[in-house]
Image: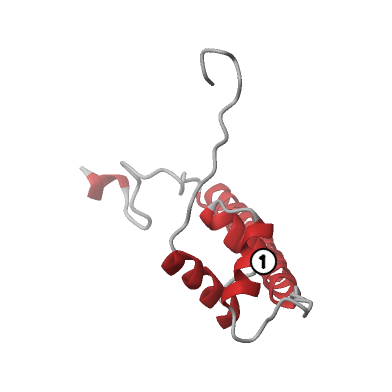
Amino acid sequence: MRKTGKLLNKRRKYSEEFRRKIVAEFESGQASVLQLSKLHSVAFQTIYSWIYRYSEVNSKGTRIVEYKDSSTKKLKDLEAKIKSLEQLIGQQTVELTYLNKLIDLASEDLGIDLKKTTATKCVGTSKSDRK
C-alpha cells in the first residue's frame, strides 16, 4: 500500500522462455492447467492465454478440453491402496491378538511369565540346577 492508502497494482511479468516451458509441460501431458496454476502460482486464465499464443497444436478458435481421467484414476488407485493397507492392518491386528492370547495361555499352563524379557526361568531345569 502507498501512503495515500491506495493499493498498488501487482502485475508480474513472465519471460517468454518460462511461458513456453509451461505450455510444453501442458502439451506433453505432464500436468493439467490447474496443476500448473497451483504449482507456479499463475492464474489458470493466464496459462490458457499462453497456450493459445505459444502452442502449435491449440489455436485461439479451438476449445481445450482436459481429461480428468488421470486425476480420477490416481485418486481411485490411492483409495484402493488405502483400502488394502487398512485390510492388512486389520489382519495383523487379529494375528497379534491371537499370538498374545496364545502366549497368555502358555504362561498359565507353564506357570511362567513368557512376556517378561529379563530374568526368565529356564524351562526344564530343577531348583538345584539353578543354584
Residue closer to the observer: 68 or 53: 53
Residue sitting nearer the eye, 122 or 12? 12
Instruction: Return the residue at label 1.
Output: 48
Task: Identify which amino acid the numbered label 1 is placed on.
Answer: Tyr
> Above or below — where is 24 with respect to 78?
below
- Kind of element beneath mark 1: helix
The residue under the point 75% across, 76% down is: 64
**In this view, which residue lies farthest toward the front?**
4
Mark 1 closeness class: few <14, some 14–19, many ≥20 residues within 10 Å: some
Instruction: Tell me residue 88's x, y (percent).
Output: 64, 66
Q: Is residue 26 left or right of residue 16?
A: right
Splitting the image into 4 quarters, where does residue 61 fall?
bottom right
Residue beneath the point at 45% across and 66% down: 16
Residue 127 lies, with reference to residue 94, above or below; the image says: above
Nearer the observer, 62 or 35: 62
Residue 89 visible to an observer of this rendering: no
